[in-house]
Amino acid sequence: MKSISKNLTYGVLILMTIALLGSLFSDSLQEKKKVTLSELVQKINSDEVSKIVVRENNLEVTLNDKSILLSRKESESGLSETLKNYSVDTEKLKKVSIEIQEQSGFLFWIGAVLPFLLPILVIGFFIWWSARQLRQGSMQAFTFGQSRARLIMPNSKRERTTFKDVAGAKEAKEELKEIVDFLKSPKKFFDIGARIPRGVLLMGAPGTGKTLLAKAVAGEAGVPFYQMSGSEFVEMFVGVGASRVRDLFKLAKKSAPSIVFIDEIDAVGRHRGTGIGGGHDEREQTLNQILVEMDGFETNESVIVMAATNRPDVLDPALLRPGRFDRRVTIDLPDINDREEILKIHAKNKPLAKDVRFRMIAERTPGFAGADLANLVNEAAILAARKNQKIVNELDLIQSIEKVMLGPERKSHILSVKEKEISAYHEAGHALVAATLPNADPVHKISIVSRGRAAGYTLKIPAEDRHLFSRSNFLDELAVSLGGYVAEKVVFNEITTGAGDDLKKASDIARSLVMRYGMSEKLGPAVFGGEEEMVFLGKEFGHERNYSEQIAELIDSEVRKTIDGAYKRAREIITSRRNKLEKIAKHLIEKETIEKDEFAAMMAAA
């Protein structure tokens, strides 16, 4: 449809151009009036003619007022003889300048043929252009099933990536160095009868650098890198995905040793046999073809399939069996040392102040993936540019942390005096309970300046990276979550909607304690409930109920008991340290923000 409308537009424009030129040409002809020989002789006799140009039998007469007339002489005689036959005054004729111009044969034929030939040429060009577009469209139908993989050649300096460009992920890189060694020198493996893994599955949270690591493997090994996303295999036409898989593996085998990388493989690699989409579901056909191609690898073909996913739990078991994706590499979120190195890599091409402490920024960003850290450095550069700075300083990086975590400041979102007071006491309640409980994360900043959807926030950052959480940690964080709710109730004897997200977080923590982690005294070490996921919906569709009604009542009772206990602890802290709550809240109302050191001094004061 696009090509047809485009051709139609071109045709209309061409026809309008022809019409415009024709009208201009006709207008130019209409400006020159034709006269007879008798009229011309009269004008010569009355001294109105200054010049006559003779072009064969055509006469171009220029009058004294610079106007031009056209006429024709007799073809059998010359101009002077013709004019004498019409009784021209010889003395008057001598005053007229007569110029004879000979017209070339080429110009004659151009002038005669062009008015007829030009429209034919334009229409012929339009027909040729339309046929060419239709031919290209028909050829695309034959190439629809070809692979659309993006190819990165090993000699591409701009796109080539190596392990030096990937900070952190030390264990993953050590695991992948074996693949690099095989691609560089496969003969030593074949000679001893070893079989290198045919498929490598990279698993990790979004933004941890799975695609970057796959590119680094190809860059280190110096082999072609074919990259496609799982969603690019599946189209509206049946069989296209399987055809593209065949074409992709055909290309990879021709240029072996090489790497085939399928990003987000869960788009086509989910569990089969769900009944949704029918037995000839295009996604399942594509998956079947991938399985067949990976099984069809010969032992001497140096082609390795790499894939990335953040949902390994939904992949079909046939993909994960030995002989296919039998090597799985888990990429964790970076620790503090990795975060520091990642920040340095992303800050290489940016002018930074000399006093920037990447270690301090890394300490403030636990849980950040590599993509988050890249975004943080970019936001800091944008912030510095908006301030018309020439370098990025440490404060820009610190402010960007909050922007990445919570969103931009909403300066237009102005709270009323009463709302500002409620928000101040709410955040003071969170901060006070967090500072009092030993297992809660330390407070780094308190603010009642709106960011994202929050009217205010209390920023708590753990002192060190943690991978295991105790029951005490959960109970203290549960009390902190309820600190704002309790503060509103104690101070104003009223509840607002500002505690909605806190209550949801508290409920999720309490239910996880009871149902997932076995931290309930009455229910003991058991997990209750399982997730049953529908393949095409992408999120939880339902829960498998593997417990009785009596256990369900006990679960609700334990959840209620856990939340009530946290509420009681938070209320005791806020009522017993009411003077501290008032001090923090009043300072927030006045200054709107309290930083870590200032808050620590307020808590240490008597």
Image (spheres, rainbow, N blue to C red):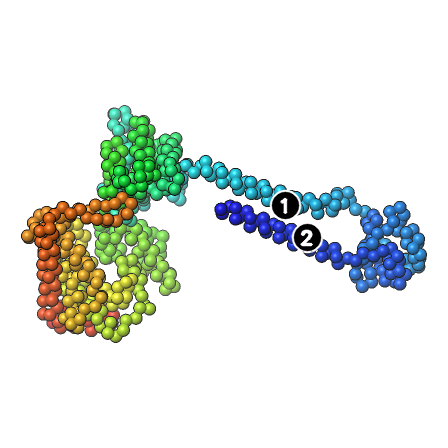
Residue 283 lies, in percent from the top left, at 32, 39
Front residue of this view, candidates 347 and 318: 318
Residue drawn at (37%, 61%), measured in percent from left and top?
385
Residue drawn at (86%, 51%), measured in percent from left and top?
73
Residue 95 lies, in percent from the top left, at 89, 59
Crowdedness of circle 1 by 10 Å Cα count: few (<14), some, many (20+)?
A: some
- Depicted 544 relative to depicted 595: above or below: above
Visible residue check, residue 174: no
Residue 601 lies, in percent from the top left, at 17, 68
CA distance separating discs 2 and 1: 14 Å
* Residue on which disc 1 sits: 122
Crowdedness of circle 2 by 10 Å Cα count: few (<14), some, many (20+)?
A: few
Disc assigned to residue 219: none
* Residue on which disc 2 sits: 22
Residue drawn at (87%, 49%), measured in percent from left and top?
74
Residue drawn at (87%, 55%), measured in percent from left and top?
37
Please name the amino acid that badge 2 sits on: Gly
View extreme (bottom): residue: 417
Please name the amino acid that badge 1 sits on: Val
- Depicted 215 relative to depicted 499: above or below: above
In which quadrant will I find the C terminus?
bottom left
Could you tell me which secondary element the residue under label 1 belongs to? helix
Could you tell whether 528 is left or right of 240 in the image?
left
Front residue of this view, candidates 384 and 49: 49
Residue 461 lies, in percent from the top left, at 20, 58
State the image quarter where residue 271 is shown.
top left
Could you tell whether 21 is left or right of 346 in the image?
right
